[in-house]
Image (tube, rainbow, N blue to C red):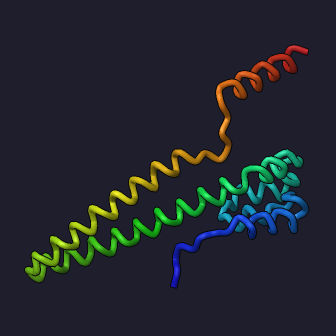
Amino acid sequence: MNYFPQKSVRTAYFLWLVSGFGWLGLHRIYLDKHRTCFVWTLTFGFFGIGALIDLFTLPRLVKRYNIIQRRRALQYQLAQLAKKKQRLIDDQRLEEAALCRDKEVLLQQQFKALQQQLQATPVLSLNKKAVETFSYTAILFSTQ
């Protein structure tokens, strides 16, 4: 049984399309983003703007979701391994406990790599110029 399933970009886009081009937020339920789905449903895709943004950001949202699921699976494996290692220590089976420690180190390295990958995958990637343009536009509209 897979407690930490991976999601598909194709399915996310299908749900985006079926939910009125993202207005109902079914794709957000699929990606376990229940709070934003509630907002999307009440505001029709955050007045259509959020639904349109989701059209372009869905691959990143799915990628982030899958990374988070892999991290959860590693955390579960680490917790199970820690319990096993403690049982082996209690039973005075120290050589097997040392092997568990080696595996634990490898899992921790994988976890750190996933953490770095998650940080390197923002949902929206705005460069400095885009932020400056947005700020300038906001100032222009606020002064009129």
Location of residue 112 in the rendering, given as x and y in whole percent from the top left corner: 39, 53
Query: Which image quadrant for residue 31?
Result: bottom right
Location of residue 68 in the rendering, given as x and y in whole percent from the top left corner: 53, 60
Query: Which image quadrant for residue 59?
Result: bottom right
Q: How many labels does the image show?
A: 0
78 or 105, nearer to the observer = 105
6 or 3, nearer to the observer = 6
> Above or below — where is 130 with respect to 14?
above
Q: Going by the image, does 138 lie left or right of 67?
A: right
Residue ID at (37%, 72%):
77
Query: Which image quadrant for residue 34?
Result: bottom right
Location of residue 130 in the rendering, given as x and y in whole percent from the top left corner: 72, 28
Location of residue 67 in the rendering, given as x and y in whole percent from the top left corner: 53, 60
Residue ID at (49%, 65%):
70
Residue ID at (74%, 67%):
10
Q: Going by the image, does 73 lie left or right of 32?
A: left
Image quarter of the C terminus: top right
